[in-house]
């Protein structure tokens, strides 16, 4: 079935469950390190190994991060919340249950705003709860069985559950990117999708336009990039439409996305769905969060992407597009912010940061924090453009040299003699020579062929090795060519 047919007959409904791995130094219920990549089982203790008699103790930092995330996503923070046991058997889960939250999660009733073609749209956040991660199974290629690494067991996660408010794959991606940006800004998550620090399950259903009830949903798992999530949703929507068009019924099931084929396939149906037999964990006291604690966390929140975006547009007067690009990355936004504070003009700074600076970063595959040109160096150079010491063209040469050597613009201009020639006498004599050497072109110009003017500008700039002030050249040429 073709996509356009899906969209005219059926409305798409999407709700997302996102697992956010927190950046705490230690695990959620024990003091073991959360560091990634160390030798298997080197970061374990009786608690995260699930040994009998070991008692888990909640990591305060995890609660702090949950409150931060809740506040940043407009949630209400529960004054009292409960940890529950989610029971299931799998070899990567030594206790036979996962400590999670069920009936009373730490955050509820939040929302995020996303940009859509129809304008701003609010996506509801049902709940955010804290839980521990499971370990990892390593399957032998030789058929010798599987090994278990419990370093990841007990690593803290937040699960962020959205309302089924999204109506297209694009809206789902906008929401995910927004949430991703927020948790990274907050410093609660490193945001690495490939390493699994930010994992998304997508619940997808369709219904005929105008129908009130939701259709039956499939839950798509195992998707580790924004691009794949979009692909998986789009494929799944088509699949469901085909099932219905063929007279069948969509069944509720969990499906796996295969990045190699771009298809989703059934993993388990509703009948095989787990019955987790949740009950309050008797090892944990109810978590009580005081209003003072919440207030303290609120005071401590950084400026979030949306507020930064608005400030850049309002105070610095840059286009919305520029503000969007610059706030996508917190460090980039900080760099730009520092530039404007030193220089004063937003648009001049955004042009250079999004232009030359970004280009060099891309070329070398490094991030802004590693830029050899600091805001001070960049603005030092911009000021030499402003006061006509150098032209915009020469500035690119100076910038490249700053990037290589880390020297200030003033030093480079001095050392390489790049100072712009504004002395009209010197420019005039160059112009006289060029005019004398090109009588044919002079005639053409005087005969009305104005395009030739550019030729003269080029010749004069070349003769001055790019150092003549372009403004002065233009002005003087007009007079001399009359
Ligand atoms: P479960 O615990 O089985 O995953 P939930 O009711 O908690 O089920 O829902 C999980 C997610 O599925 C939520 O993000 C919710 O918005 C979404 N969802 C629920 N019903 C639908 C539906 N019919 N279509 C799409 N998404 C749905
Ligand atoms: Mg689910
Ligand atoms: Zn441990």
Image (cartoon, grey):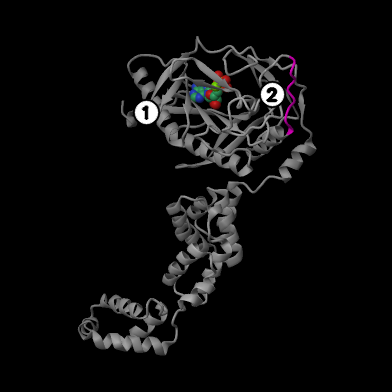
Quadrant in the picture for residue 375: bottom right
Q: Is mark 2 within 8 Å of ligand 3?
A: yes
Q: Dividing the image into four equal quarters, which quarter contains ligand 1?
A: top right
State which region is magenta: 53-60
Left or right: 409 in relation to 3: right
Residue 213 in view: no
Q: Quadrant of the C terminus?
A: bottom left
* Residue 411 placement (x, y as % from top left): 53, 73
Sort mark 1 into few (<14), some (14-19) or many (20+) by Cα contacts within 10 Å.
Answer: few
* Residue 164 placement (x, y as % from top left): 53, 28
Disc 1 and disc 2: Cα gap in Å?
38 Å
Quadrant in the picture for residue 439: bottom left
Q: Secondary structure at mark 2?
A: loop
Check the image and report above or below for 359 versus 117. Answer: below
Sequence order check: which comes first, mark 1 or mark 2?
A: 2
Q: Secondary structure at mark 1?
A: loop
- Residue 478 located within the stretch drawn in magenta: no
Q: In this rendered view, identify the residue nearer to me: 216 or 365.
A: 365
Left or right: 328 in relation to 468: right
Check the image and report above or below for 290 versus 220. Answer: below
Q: Is mark 1 within 8 Å of ligand 2?
A: no
The mark found on residue 45 in the picture is: 2
| Front label number (1 vs 2) | 2
């Amino acid at each position: 079935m073709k996509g356009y047919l899906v969209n005219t007959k059926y409305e798409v409904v999407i709700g997302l469950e996102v697992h956010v791995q927190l950046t705490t130094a230690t695990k959620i219920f024990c003091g073991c390190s959360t560091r990634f990549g160390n030798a298997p089982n080197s970061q374990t203790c009786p608690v995260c190994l699930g040994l009998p008699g070991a008692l888990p103790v909640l990591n305060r930092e995890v609660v702090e991060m949950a409150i931060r995330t809740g506040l940043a996503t407009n949630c209400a923070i529960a004054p009292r919340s409960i940890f529950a046991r989610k029971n299931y058997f799998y070899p990567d889960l030594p206790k036979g249950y996962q400590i999670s939250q069920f009936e009373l999660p730490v955050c509820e009733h939040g929302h995020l705003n996303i940009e859509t073609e129809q304008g701003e749209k609010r996506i509801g956040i049902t709940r955010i709860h804290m839980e521990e991660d499971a370990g990892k199974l390593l399957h032998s290629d030789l058929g010798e069985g599987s090994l278990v690494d419990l370093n990841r067991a007990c690593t803290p996660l937040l699960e962020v559950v959205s309302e089924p408010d999204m109506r297209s794959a694009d809206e789902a991606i906008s929401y995910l990117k927004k949430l991703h940006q927020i948790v990274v800004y907050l410093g609660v998550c490193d945001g690495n999708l490939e390493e699994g620090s930010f994992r998304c399950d997508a619940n997808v259903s369709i219904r005929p336009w105008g129908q009130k009830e939701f259709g039956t949903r499939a839950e798509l798992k195992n998707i580790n990039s924004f691009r794949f999530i979009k692909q998986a949703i789009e494929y799944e929507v088509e699949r469901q439409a085909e099932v219905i068009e063929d007279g069948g019924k969509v069944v509720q099931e969990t499906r796996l996305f295969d990045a190699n084929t771009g298809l989703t396939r059934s993993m388990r149906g509703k009948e095989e769905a787990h019955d987790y037999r949740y009950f309050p964990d008797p090892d944990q006291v109810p978590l009580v969060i005081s209003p003072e604690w919440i207030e303290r966390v609120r005071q401590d929140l950084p400026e979030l992407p949306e507020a930064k975006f608005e400030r850049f547009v309002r105070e610095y007067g840059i286009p919305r597009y520029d503000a969007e690009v610059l706030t996508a990355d917190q460090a980039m936004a900080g760099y730009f912010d520092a530039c404007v504070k030193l220089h004063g003009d937003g648009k001049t700074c955004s042009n250079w940061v999004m232009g030359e600076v970004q280009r060099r970063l891309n070329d070398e595959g490094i991030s802004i924090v590693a830029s050899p040109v600091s805001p001070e160096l960049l603005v030092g150079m911009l000021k030499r453009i402003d006061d006509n010491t150098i032209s915009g063209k020469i500035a690119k040469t100076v910038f490249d040299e700053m990037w290589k050597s880390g020297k200030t613009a003033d030093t480079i201009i001095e050392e390489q003699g790049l100072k712009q020639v504004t002395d009209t006498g010197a420019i005039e004599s160059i112009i006289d020579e060029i005019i004398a050497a090109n009588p044919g072109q002079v005639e053409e110009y005087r005969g009305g062929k104005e395009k030739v003017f550019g030729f003269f500008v080029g010749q004069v700039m070349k003769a001055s090795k790019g150092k003549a002030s372009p403004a002065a050249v233009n002005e003087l040429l007009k007079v001399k060519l009359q």
